[in-house]
C-alpha cells in the first residue's frame, strides 16, 4: 500500500484499489497535506492528471457530517459540474456526506427542495450559485472552503464578475483553492483575491501520468471538411470529439453528417441541459462516432480511453489547443490529436505547434485508413487532387443555402415576414 493510500480512511482504501488505481499522481500527492492543513492552494498540472481527486479527497475528509454548506466547488461549465458531482458523490457517500449540484439550466425548484436536506458539499456553476446565495437559499457564510475548478476560465470576461461576487458573499476566514492545467495564466488575478499568500503547486514538469499523444495534421480543402469528417467516422475503432470555433459551422456540419447517416451529435451552450447530458451519455456509451462541439467541451470533460481529438478548426490560442488536446492521453492512455488544415490554416497550426514545442507529422486519408506516408496516386488522381488544392486558394463565395444554422434561418424567415407585412401596409 502506498504512502498516499495510508492517509485515506479504510473504506476509501478499498475503493481506491477497486477503481484500479495504483500510485497517486504528482498533483494528488503534492496537494494532500496543504489542503488538509487549510492552506490556500493553486494547483497546476496537465489535463487528465487527476486534479479532481487531488482536491476532493483531502477536502472531503475535513467536512463534518450533518452541517450544511461547508465545501463549495465552482466549475466553468455545466458538463464539468455534472462530472465533478458524480465523482464527489462516489467518494462522499462512503463517509456519509451529501453532495448537491446547483447548475444553470436545471430545474431550480427541484434544487431548492434538495437543499432542505442540508448537503455538506455544493457543486455548481457561478450564475446559479450566486442566484441562490442572493436569495439566501445557500448560506454563503457557512462555507469553509471554496474550490475553483478550471480557475482561469472562471476569471474570463463574462464570468469574472459572477465569481468575484460569490467570493464577496463568503465568510471572512475561508480556504481558497484553484485548479487548472493553465491556472498560471490567472495567477495575477488570483493573488488579488486574498491578503494571504497562495501555495502554488505546479507539477507540470514532473507529472508522468499522461499517455503518449501524437499530434498530426491532414491536409484538406475547406469545401471537403465535412466530407473528411464523414470518411473519418468510418475508420476502424474511430471515435472523436470534434472541435469547431463557431457554433454556426458546427451546426451546419452536424446537419450534413446526419444527412449522410453518420452517427453524430452536437454539444453547444445554447442547448438545454437535458440535450447536452444525452449527447455526452451517448458518446460515452459508444453510440456516436463523433461528438461535435466548441470549446465548451475543452475543459475537464473526461471520456475514458477516447482515441481521437479532431480540430476541425485550428484553435485561436495555445490555451485552447492545450485543453482540447487534454481530452486524450488521460491517465496513461494513448491518443491522437488530428488537425484538419487547409492552405489558409496550415501555417497557423505550424506556428502554434512551434511555439508550444509540439512535434507535428502529416497523415493521409486513403482507402479507409490513415497513412503516415503519402499513398501512390496515378496521374489522373494526382491531377484532380492538385486542381482541388489550387481551387481552394481562391476566395469561396458563401451561398448560405445549407451552411446556415437553424437560428440564422429562423431570424431570416422572421425578417422576411416582417418586411412583407411592412410592404402591405
Image (cartoon, helix red, strand yellow):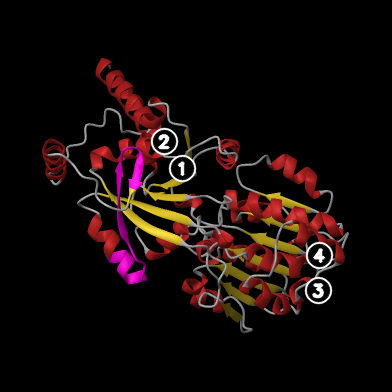
Residue 279 falls in image quadrant:
top right
Q: How crowded is mark 4: few (under 14 residues within 10 Å), some or many (20 or more)?
A: some
Estimate the spatial distance between the alpha carbons at disc 3 and disc 2, rounded to whole Å: 47 Å
Q: Is disc 3 placed on a helix, strand or loop?
A: helix
Which SS class for mark 4?
A: helix
Looking at the image, residue 162 lies above or below residue 394: below
Q: Do the residues labelled 2 and 4 touch (CB within 8 Å)?
A: no
Q: Does the magenta stretch include residue 324?
A: no
For the residues labelled 1 and 3, the Cα–Cα distance comes to 40 Å
- Give the percent coordinates (x, y) of residue 139: 76, 59
Image quadrant in which the C terminus is located: top left
Disc 3 target residue:
6
Q: Find residue 1 and report its horizontal and vertical position in percent.
A: 78, 72
Does dot 2 land on a helix, a strand or a loop? loop
Q: What stretch is highlighted in magenta?
A: 351-370
Alpha-carbon distance for marks 1 and 2? 7 Å
Name the residue tied to disc 1.
Answer: 238
State the mark number for residue 13: 4
**Where in the figure is residue 331, as x and y percent of width and height?**
59, 61
Answer whether residue 138 is visible to the viewer in this image.
no
Task: Name the residue at 64% across, 56% down.
Answer: 130
Residue bearing mark 2? 234
Mark 1, secondary structure of its residue? loop
Question: Which quarter of the picture shows residue 198?
Answer: bottom right
Q: Which residue is drawn at 60% across and 56% down?
A: 126
Query: Disc 3 versus disc 4: distance between alpha carbons?
Result: 8 Å
Q: Which of pointers 2 and 4 lies earlier in the amino acid sequence? A: 4
Q: Is residue 303 visible?
A: yes
Front in this rendered view, residue 323 or 190 = 323
Rendering quarter of residue 190: bottom right
Residue 419 horizontal side relative to residue 335, left or right: left
Amino acid at each position: 500500500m502506498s504512502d498516499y493510500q495510508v492517509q485515506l480512511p479504510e473504506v476509501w482504501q478499498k475503493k481506491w484499489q477497486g477503481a484500479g488505481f495504483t500510485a497517486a499522481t504528482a498533483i494528488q500527492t503534492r496537494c494532500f497535506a496543504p489542503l488538509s492543513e487549510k492552506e490556500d492552494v493553486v494547483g497546476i498540472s496537465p489535463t487528465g492528471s487527476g486534479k479532481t481527486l487531488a482536491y476532493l479527497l483531502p477536502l472531503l475528509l475535513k467536512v463534518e457530517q450533518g452541517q450544511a454548506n461547508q465545501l463549495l466547488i465552482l466549475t466553468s461549465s455545466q458538463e464539468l459540474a455534472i462530472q465533478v458531482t458524480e465523482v464527489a458523490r462516489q467518494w462522499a457517500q462512503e463517509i456519509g456526506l451529501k453532495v448537491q449540484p446547483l447548475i444553470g439550466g436545471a430545474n431550480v425548484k427541484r434544487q431548492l427542495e434538495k437543499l432542505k436536506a442540508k448537503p455538506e458539499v455544493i457543486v455548481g456553476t457561478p450564475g446559479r450559485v450566486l442566484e441562490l446565495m442572493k436569495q439566501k437559499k445557500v448560506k454563503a457564510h457557512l462555507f469553509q472552503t471554496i474550490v475553483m475548478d478550471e480557475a482561469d476560465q472562471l476569471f474570463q470576461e463574462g464570468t469574472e464578475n459572477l465569481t468575484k461576487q460569490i467570493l464577496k458573499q463568503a465568510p471572512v476566514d475561508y480556504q481558497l483553492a484553484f485548479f487548472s492545467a493553465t491556472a498560471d495564466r490567472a495567477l495575477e488575478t488570483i493573488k488579488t483575491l486574498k491578503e494571504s499568500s497562495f501555495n502554488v503547486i505546479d507539477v507540470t514538469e514532473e507529472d508522468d501520468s499522461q499517455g503518449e499523444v501524437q499530434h498530426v495534421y491532414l491536409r484538406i480543402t475547406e469545401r471537403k471538411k465535412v466530407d473528411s469528417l464523414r470518411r473519418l467516422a468510418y475508420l476502424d475503432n474511430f471515435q472523436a470529439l470534434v472541435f469547431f470555433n463557431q457554433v454556426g459551422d458546427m451546426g451546419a456540419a452536424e446537419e450534413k453528417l446526419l444527412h449522410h447517416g453518420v452517427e453524430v451529435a452536437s454539444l453547444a451552450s445554447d442547448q438545454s441541459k437535458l440535450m447536452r447530458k444525452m449527447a455526452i451519455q451517448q458518446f460515452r456509451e459508444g453510440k456516436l462516432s463523433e461528438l461535435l462541439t466548441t470549446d465548451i467541451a475543452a475543459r475537464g470533460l473526461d471520456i475514458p480511453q477516447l482515441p481521437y481529438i479532431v480540430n476541425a478548426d485550428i484553435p485561436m490560442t495555445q490555451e485552447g489547443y492545450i485543453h482540447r488536446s487534454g481530452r486524450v492521453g488521460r491517465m496513461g492512455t494513448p491518443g491522437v490529436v488530428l488537425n484538419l488544415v487547409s492552405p489558409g490554416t496550415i501555417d497557423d497550426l505550424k506556428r502554434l505547434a512551434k511555439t508550444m514545442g509540439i512535434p507535428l507529422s502529416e497523415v493521409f486519408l486513403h482507402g479507409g485508413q490513415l497513412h503516415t506516408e503519402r499513398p501512390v496516386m496515378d496521374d489522373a488522381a494526382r491531377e484532380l487532387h492538385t486542381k482541388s488544392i489550387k481551387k481552394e486558394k481562391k476566395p469561396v463565395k458563401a451561398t448560405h443555402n445549407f451552411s446556415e444554422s437553424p437560428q440564422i434561418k429562423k431570424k431570416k424567415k422572421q425578417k422576411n415576414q416582417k418586411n412583407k407585412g411592412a410592404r402591405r401596409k
